[in-house]
Image (cartoon, rainbow, N blue to C red):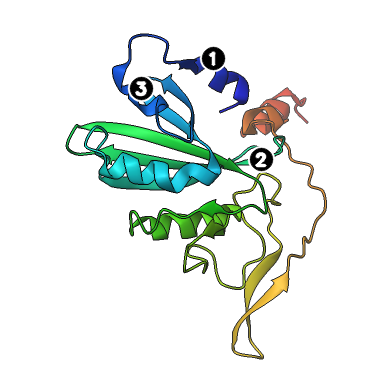
Amino acid sequence: MSEENLTETTEPATQADPFGDMLRTLDGVQDVMLERDERIVHVARDELSPVMRTLRDDARFAFEQCMDVCGVDWPERPQRFEVVYNLLSVTRNDRLRVIVNTDEVTPVPSVSQIWPGATWWEREVFDLFGVTFEGLVDHRRILTDNGFEGHPMRKDFPLTGHVELRYDEEQKRVVYDKVALTQEFRNFDFLSPWEAMNTLPGDEKATRDAEPNS
């Protein structure tokens, strides 16, 4: 989704919203928005841990579960990455999306000590986007191989990747090689099969019938 579309579908929660007002009182909460009836909270990166702990432990919020952690890449922004946390309150039957921003080098406080299950999600964000998490004890890759170069969900990551796998018959094992494109440019013909055909099956009969009899 482009930033223009995001701006059109996201609006401040200016109508009566007592719950949103309670969220705004938390230190570190920068903004509370509504998008398609779902509440979104932007939190200062350094204040993420205390805000998340309050959202879990305070009975007014009671977001017991962290359902997902994912990343979004906006290359044109100085802080190009958004780390998005989707929280669920079983007690109140409510959901909340928490967003923090960071750049390529500044770590985000880990919430793995608040929700241990978030360890897997944070490892996934690190693997795919390269965002590191302060306090995360395990930064191993989880979706790509340990020898993988780069982070494939970044917008500036080449579609072909940097390395490729192949089975080496001499070494009898899988090896890594630099990507070698056998063809730098391909001229694709996007005509449909019917447009590309100059003659159709059976046209030769018309030509044969038109010939004079010998």
Residue 136 spot, x, y in % from top left: 47, 63
- Within 10 Å of disc 3 (Cα), the crowding (few <14, some 14-19, many 20+) is some
Vertical placement of 214 versus 103: above or below? above
**Residue at the image point whose x is 63% and y is 86% from the top:** 169
Q: Earlier in the sequence, mark 1 or mark 2?
A: 1
Does residue 58 show up? yes
Could you tell me the amino acid type at mark 2?
Answer: Gln
Quarter-of-image position of residue 19:
top left
In the rendered structure, are the residues bearing label 3 and label 2 in contact, judged by CB atoms less than 8 Å apart?
no
Viewer-side residue, 127 vs 200: 127
Q: Secondary structure at mark 2?
A: loop
The tag on residue 126 is: none
**Residue at the image point whose x is 35% and y is 46% from the top:** 53
Viewer-side residue, 195 vs 43: 43
Mark nearer the viewer, 1 or 3: 3
Viewer-side residue, 32 vs 139: 32
Mark nearer the viewer, 1 or 2: 2
The residue indicated by pointer 2 is 79
Q: Secondary structure at mark 3?
A: helix
The tag on residue 20 is: 3
